[in-house]
Image: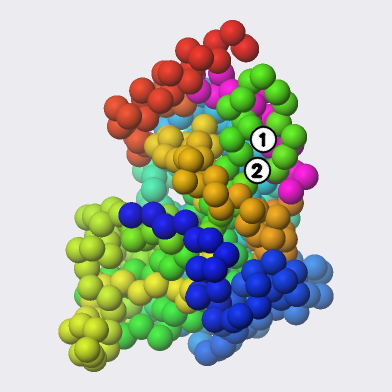
Amino acid sequence: MTIFFNARQILLFIGTTIVLSNFLIASRLPSPELNGGVRLLRESQQQTSNVFSDYDETEEEKTMLHVVTTRFMQSQAGLTTLGKARLKLFETFCLPSMQQQVIDNFLWFIMIDPNLEVELLERLQFLLASHPNYFLILSNEKLLTPNNMMNKQEVVRIITGDTKLLYSRMMDVNRPLLMETRLDADDGLHRKTLGQIQYAAMKLPQATGGWQVICADVHLEWRNDEIGNLNSTVETSGKIRLVKEDICVTPGYTLVRHREPGNNEFPQWPKMGHQQMNTLWPECRSNSTKDGEAATLNCWKRLPKYPAALRSRTITSAGMSRVQSSAKDRKYDEQTNDLWQHVTRDFGIGEERTMLTSQYLQKNIHGIAVDNLRGQCTRGHSCKKSSKDKLETLANETASSW
């Protein structure tokens, strides 16, 4: 079930009687301060330092390995129009939010199809090259692990990033706390989210032999209904809404593992999707309480009640879920102006750029729909009849605009 909040309900989340618009202008939506050994970077460090060394980590951080994985056009090489549109969304939502993160002790893996078009590959390389902990990887695997890094039969090609940093972190057998965070290429994270994930992971029971999951409690959604209106040009940056879902959403979804000492392996993921996690597993608790029995393994924990992530809903989505606003969604449109200030400030996502991206999607809507339809059921992607039906309808309706 998905819940959209009006302004009165949002006040319950933030625990204040100040009206939402004034609160957002004067301050931030709440997120607890990062502590417990997770550092905040000074602004000057963020702007001037691109050099990693052994001195960049505290002793506490040297016991953890945090990887963020973003999959881009895997097993979909040749769908050029779709690839260009997804790259626009990556530059608009995903990349700025990662550049805003207040910590830097993570490795970001952008996994792309080895046969991706040269134009797209070179653009990604240009965007990522200046960041030593951003790794552009030519692979259709779901994740980079020590095992496939050392596989001499299938050499993994790593295009950007500091490989010395990569190997020193990934091969280190003295990093028992493993965190694997997922982020789709068209989504974004609040600037404090990766730090909050690390802080939450350190507070979880230190039990080996199973998984723990961390995910957002509330998040933001962006969509622009004007993209589908071919009778007029897009003139706005779209709508933002605050959303709470029963499921664990994908942006920021993190698998946590406490590995045995002397072990750098990435254990096999649990065989269930993010939609099932918090219904099949209990909430993590060190001790039994009135809310439930103790659970230290195969359990989940939500981040504090602040918008930890932003999901974009567009025609590039393989699942095509909630791409257009419903009638009940539109009554929350008055939130948009206030929420945009929050998104720009804490996600690094700009309104002007988002409008230009919306215009690009509208201009190329037919080609995107056709490519997205062709990309259905490829390895690792959606294969739902409802998605194919929506895309086929959209391709037929927009054929005259191509």
Look at the numbered disc 2 and give the secondary structure of its residue: loop
Q: Which mark is residue 238?
A: 2
* Neighbour tally class for label 2: few under 14, some 14-19, many 20 plus, Cα within 10 Å: many
Mark pair 1, 2: CA separation: 8 Å
Res. 100 image quadrant: bottom right
Q: Is residue 359 above or below residue 236?
A: above
Relative horizontal placement of residue 97, taking residue 257 as reference (left or right) = right
Res. 302 image quadrant: bottom left
Q: Residue at x 48, y 20 (%)?
A: 394
Look at the numbered disc 1 and give the secondary structure of its residue: helix
Badge nearest the viewer, 1 or 2:
2
Task: Estimate the x, y position of residue 94 in percent, counting from the top left.
Answer: 60, 51
Task: Estimate the x, y position of residue 77 in percent, counting from the top left.
Answer: 49, 27
Tell me if residue 131 can be seen: no
Please state, as top left, top right, bottom left or bottom right, where the C terminus lies in the image: top right
Res. 301 image quadrant: bottom left
Is residue 369 on the magenta stretch?
A: yes
Residue in front for this viewpoint, 148 or 26: 26
Pointer 1 and pointer 2: residues touching (CB < 8 Å)?
A: yes
N-term-proximal mark, 1 vs 2 = 2
* Neighbour tally class for label 1: few under 14, some 14-19, many 20 plus, Cα within 10 Å: many
Residue in front for this viewpoint, 332 or 63: 332
Q: Callout 2, which amino acid?
A: Gly
**What residue does disc 1 label?**
358
Q: Callout 1, which amino acid?
A: Ser
Query: What residue range appears in magenta?
Result: 351-370
Please state, as top left, top right, bottom left or bottom right, where the N terminus lies in the image: bottom left
Task: Estimate the x, y position of residue 68 in percent, counting from the top left.
Answer: 50, 60
Residue in front for this viewpoint, 212 or 294: 294
Task: Estimate the x, y position of residue 175 in percent, counting from the top left.
Answer: 42, 78
Q: Residue furthest top?
A: 400
